[in-house]
Image (cartoon, helix red, strand yellow):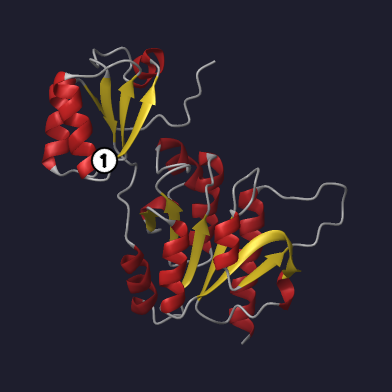
Amino acid sequence: MQNNEEKSGSIICGRNPVLEAVRSGREIDRLLVAHGVSGGSVTAIIAKCRAKGILIKEVSPQKLDYYCGGANHQGVAVMFAAQEYATVEDIFASAEERNQKPFIIICDEIEDPHNLGAIVRTAEACGVHGIIIPKRRSASLNATVAKAASGALEYMPVARVTNIASTIDELKRRGVWVFGADMDGEDYTETDFDVPCAIVIGNEGSGIGALTAKKCDKIISLPMCGKINSLNASVAAGVLMYEVVRKRRSQ
């Protein structure tokens, strides 16, 4: 059965429409190219997308048929995000406007759009200033994320970056403490979150990447008292976000 989790609420199919969409400067989430399609205007479309840093994904013709609802796609289509991406600078500006210490969530390769949407929803409720996701190997701001976020995506800045590790370096240079959530860390209740902080939530299966973990100032853990050794990524994120809220309110 076809997985529809990447299906966006806004898609343009066909070579000429796609080329015009790319030329227009409108923010594109990703270019989809059917396996085996190349040459002519497709080559030009791919080149323009690469120059603009747009993610390019090769898919089966059947999958592209599904995304385009049976329209004549000529082997190419572009998807648009359900919400425009912010920048890291926008996230800092949000904290400054509210006269608060930055509170940021970094999603390190969260691939399930339901998880990402749930994190967005909880982050908005907790007063998080913004979420950072990687451009590759991550759920994007598609229709499923928007639905799972239940309206919170309208209010939560989400920045998409090329490299999480270098972004963490940038945050640290700007005075942000970076805490990675992993099973081999210190008890999260022993951490002082009343500082400019970012919490890194790792991939649903493999957790935080090794390089990302090395970049963190501290690794924190949730105690596991049962027979399983991990929580759903969005659940763990929710517990940690509310701990930040609790610690900041108690100061």
Residue at x-position 64% and y-position 75% = 246
Which residue in the rendered view is the most extreme toward the bottom?
Answer: 251
Asked if residue 108 lies left or right of residue 8, the reply is right
**22 in relation to 226, above or below:** above
107 left or right of 207 in image: left
Question: Which residue is label 1 attached to?
Answer: 28
Q: Quadrant of residue 87?
A: bottom left
Q: Which residue sits at x=69%, y=67%?
A: 220
Count of numbered badges drawn on the protein: 1
Whether residue 18 is visible, yes or no, is no
Of the pair 213 and 116, the residue shown nearer to us: 213
Q: Nearer the viewer, residue 232 or 166?
A: 166
Rendered location of residue 198, percent (x, y) = 52, 69
The quarter holding residue 95 reads: bottom left
Position in image of residue 170 (x %, y %): 40, 71
Q: Is residue 91 visible?
A: yes
Q: Position of residue 113 (x, y in %)?
A: 50, 40
Which quadrant does the N terminus fall into? top right
Residue in the image at 65% along x and 46% along y: 206
Residue at 60% in and 56% down: 210
Query: Does 35 sit above or below residue 236?
Result: above
State whether residue 121 is above or below residue 48.
below
Q: Amino acid at mark 1?
A: Ile
Looking at the figure, which quarter contains the C terminus? bottom right
Q: Residues within 10 Å of mark 1 (few under 14, many from 20)?
A: many
> Residue 35 at x, y = what percent?
35, 17
Q: Quadrant of residue 200?
A: bottom right
